[in-house]
Image (cartoon, rainbow, N blue to C red):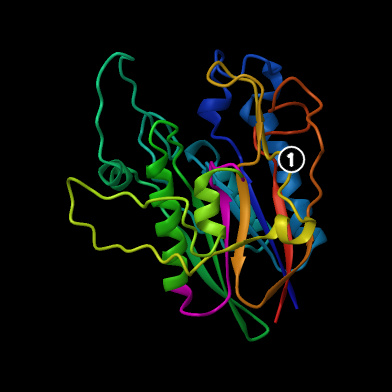
């Protein structure tokens, strides 16, 4: 018996339609209606062409919420969601801006706990076999990478806690590259190349479990991570082309196949005519033990 897990950061519409952000994209390909038609077509093919498909989405927001509800209802799917962004942005992230010459000393735990990101974890049963599925979107914070490590470690250990020894899959946009320390913390047992941050503000009871690690579906199947899962040319990051999305797992699961991804982008920037998001959709088929 197999299960197919799809992970897709669909790009929040309010970002896509900012005229001064995706400046290398054709404006007609940034329109929500155009992108929505491509997104639902891609997802419908995943559901129709494969058995036991589970969809994990990131950057779901209010403009598309009702469309997704109708879409999944039509395909006889149960739709679980949680919107945790603020009213002004319609999505789950935010940033802070300060003068370059301002001295800023922060506490990574304080910053991490102020983030509103939410883990969705479901237990499913297929032919009597139990499996936990989680999806998460790690907040991007290049100024404080410790914040991202905290989120990654906590969500990993929380999945272990929820699954209570059973197999689980954790998919999403982790905003980390394979060479980042955060990736090593998630995948390398007893990784000693990093000192977990302490707090000067809070008394932290959480102790990371460095024995509990995850495997990556693409790395297990192909021997390496994809060349890229995110491609965008924006004022903040010119020609950014890196792997940020993963399908992690642990337990008695075997990766049968993964969705083949393009070797190179074929446009100036995503979104484009055939890619409705700046992220690629990724997917993996697992054999249940």
**Can residue 177 be found in the magenta stretch?**
yes
**Can residue 258 be found in the magenta stretch?**
no
Vertical order, 171 against 239 (above or below): below
Q: Name the residue beneath numbered marker 1.
A: 227
Q: Residue 24, percent across and down?
A: 68, 15
Query: In terms of image quadrants, where is residue 203?
Result: bottom left
Q: Residue 281, percent across and down?
A: 70, 45
Q: Which residues, given as a range, are shown in magenta?
A: 162-178
Residue at horizontal 46 percent and vertical 71 percent from the top:
160
Residue at horizontal 64 percent and vertical 21 percent from the top:
233
Label 1 sits on a secondary structure element that is loop
Direction from residue 5 to residue 113 in the image, left or right:
left
Please indicate, yes or no, whether residue 69 appears anywhere in the rendered image. Answer: no
Q: Residue 242, percent across and down?
A: 65, 35
Vertical order, 239 against 67 (above or below): above
* In front of the other: 215 or 85: 215
Residue at horizontal 77 percent and vertical 27 percent from the top:
273
């Amino acid at each position: 018996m197999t299960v197919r897990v799809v992970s897709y950061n669909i790009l929040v519409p309010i970002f896509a339609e900012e005229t001064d952000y995706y400046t290398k994209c054709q404006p007609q390909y940034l329109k929500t209606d155009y992108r929505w038609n491509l997104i639902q077509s891609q997802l419908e093919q995943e559901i129709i062409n494969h058995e036991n498909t589970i969809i994990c989405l990131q950057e779901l927001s209010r403009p598309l919420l009702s469309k997704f509800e109708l879409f999944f209802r039509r395909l006889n799917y149960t739709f679980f969601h949680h919107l945790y962004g603020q009213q002004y942005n319609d999505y789950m992230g935010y940033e802070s801006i300060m003068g370059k010459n301002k001295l800023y000393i922060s506490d990574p735990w304080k910053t991490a706990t102020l983030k509103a990101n939410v883990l969705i974890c479901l237990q499913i049963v297929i032919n009597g076999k139990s499996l936990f599925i989680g999806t998460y979107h790690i907040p991007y914070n290049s100024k404080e990478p410790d914040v991202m490590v905290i989120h990654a470690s906590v969500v990993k250990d929380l999945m272990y806690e929820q699954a209570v020894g059973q197999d689980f899959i954790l998919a999403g946009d982790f905003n980390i590259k394979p060479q980042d320390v955060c990736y090593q913390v998630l995948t390398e047992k007893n990784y000693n190349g990093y000192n977990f941050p302490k707090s000067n503000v809070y008394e932290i009871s959480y102790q990371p479990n460095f024995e509990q690690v995850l495997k990556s579906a693409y790395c297990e199947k192909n021997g390496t991570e994809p060349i890229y899962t995110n491609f965008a040319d924006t004022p903040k990051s010119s020609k950014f082309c890196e792997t940020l999305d993963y399908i992690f797992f642990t337990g008695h699961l075997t990766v049968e196949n993964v969705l083949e991804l393009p070797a190179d982008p074929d446009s100036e920037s995503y979104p484009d005519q055939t890619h409705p998001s700046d992220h690629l959709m990724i997917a993996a088929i697992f054999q249940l033990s």
